[in-house]
Amino acid sequence: ARHGMDALKLMNKCKPELLIIDWMMPTMSGPDLVEKIRTSEASRSLPIIMLTAKADQDSKTSGSHIGANGYLGKPFDKVQLTSMVSNLLKLKEKEKKLSELNQHLKDNVLKRFLPESLVSKVIAGEKMIDDKPNITPITVLFCDICNFSSKSFELGPLKMVNILNQYIDVMYKIIFDHGG
């Protein structure tokens, strides 16, 4: 892109995996571009390297404060730039995998055993799972329906887990529909 405004337009079209931007550009400076990128949910975590002739410590600190992930002064070492790009892309990939694992945990574990309202509060950081529990009176009835205990030995662990998971899927919906 020739300048910051062009970069924003191109970003909407091509969805880059990493940006290398100059500090001093016409129309929109590098720091202004970084701040604009960091305000957008879609590009907030996009890796950004500032490449600039402003190699003083104050500029490096300022670049870091506005959200640049890397900072290289000109003239720059190509090996250092390549290494920085590689490391930031690896970090971004790990961040993506972590996000997928968190989504899996949320969808397949938390939502299965906790009400949606509680899961949302935990994910937003408004509530901790280790918060003190509330004492709620409940009635629990355990009974050996249809000789279930002996059937579990006959069917084996894998089949029993599948049966119990089907049961839990039905029951947790009923329980949560009634505020349980």
Image: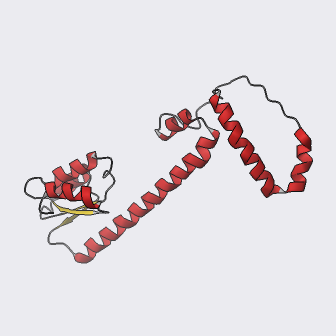
Residue 133 shows in the view: no
Up-down relation of residue 73 to residue 40 (above or below): below
Location of residue 105 in the rendering, given as x and y in whole percent from the top left corner: 57, 49
Q: As drawn, is 108 to the left or to the right of 84? A: right
The structure residue drawn at horizontal position 92% and vertical position 48%, both measured from the top left corner, is 150
102 or 174: nearer the viewer: 174
Residue 30 shows in the view: yes
Location of residue 99 in the rendering, given as x and y in whole percent from the top left corner: 47, 54
15 or 120: nearer the viewer: 15
The structure residue drawn at horizontal position 12% and vertical position 63%, both measured from the top left corner, is 2
Up-down relation of residue 48 to residue 168 (above or below): below
Up-down relation of residue 163 to residue 72 (above or below): above
Location of residue 125 in the rendering, given as x and y in whole percent from the top left corner: 47, 38
Q: Count the marks.
A: 0
Up-down relation of residue 103 to residue 118 (above or below): below
Q: Quadrant of the N terminus?
A: bottom left
The structure residue drawn at horizontal position 71% and vertical position 37%, both measured from the top left corner, is 171
Q: Residue furthest left?
A: 26
Q: Quadrant of residue 52?
A: bottom left
Q: As drawn, is 179 to the left or to the right of 51? A: right
Q: Quadrant of residue 84?
A: bottom left
